[in-house]
Amino acid sequence: MSDSALDFSRMFHVVLVAPEIAGNTGAVGRTCVAVGAMLWLVRPLGFIIDDRRIRRAGLDYWEHLQYRVVDSVDEVAEALGRDRLWSFSTKASRIYTEASFRLGDGLVFGSESRGLPQSWIERQGDRLVRIPIRPEARSLNLANSVSIGLYEAARQAGGDLG
């Protein structure tokens, strides 16, 4: 399905900023298919998009994935609206369950080793959220974080995925 045939307001969007690990991106893609979300990959990517590790992690789901590769997160903001983006960061004070997710929202996640750029975080205000974790854990795996956030968004939207 071409992007022009998609109604961005009728789905959730997962935005990975500079993802580094092909297997994580494949697992995120699989989760997006399960929920009916679109995946946005923001360059630079730490892998080639047709990497076999992406396909293996996504199994036979990858052919059903709606995705777009863009050069900046600002392109996503232009397509969806900046006020529709929720950014996930360990630096946020607001817990993700306190956000009010709606269909058409984008959930933005940073790279595995660096997270989101500080310049992006500083502009997010009350649209910056975190998944609570114990202090002994620096962060969660990217694919797990996306699953937690995306399924909470789907739950708030009524939870009926099919």
Image (cartoon, helix red, strand yellow):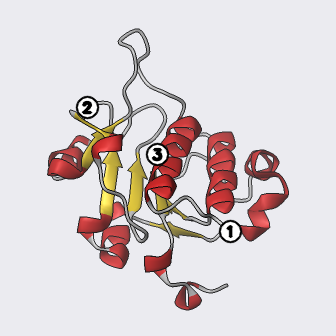
Left or right, residue 56 beside residue 66 = right
18 relative to 38, above or below:
above
Identified by mark 1, the residue type is Gly
125 relative to 65, above or below:
above
The percent position of residue 88, horizontal first and vertical second, equals 35, 43
Left or right, residue 103 beside residue 46 = left
How many neighbours does mark 2 have within 10 angstroms: few (below 14), some (14-19), or many (20 or more)? Answer: few
Between 152 and 107, the one nearer to me in the picture: 152
Q: Which residue is mark 2?
A: 91
Residue furthest to the bottom in view is 4
Place residue 64 in its image quadrant.
bottom right
Q: Which residue is mark 1?
A: 162
Contact between labelled residues 3 and 2, with CB atoms less than 8 Å apart: no
Q: Distance from label 1 to label 3 (Cα)?
A: 19 Å
14 relative to 95, above or below:
below
Q: Nearer the viewer, mark 2 or mark 3?
A: 3
Q: Nearer the viewer, mark 2 or mark 1?
A: 1
Q: Element at badge 1?
A: loop
Q: Residue at x 43, y 24 (%)?
A: 139
Q: The N terminus lies in which quarter of the figure?
A: bottom right
How many neighbours does mark 3 have within 10 angstroms: few (below 14), some (14-19), or many (20 or more)? Answer: many
Q: Is residue 15 visible?
A: no
Contact between labelled residues 3 and 1, with CB atoms less than 8 Å apart: no
Identified by mark 2, the residue type is Lys
Q: Is residue 13 visible?
A: yes
Place residue 46 in its image quadrant.
top right
The percent position of residue 138, horizontal first and vertical second, equals 40, 18
Identified by mark 3, the residue type is Gly
Q: Element at badge 3?
A: helix
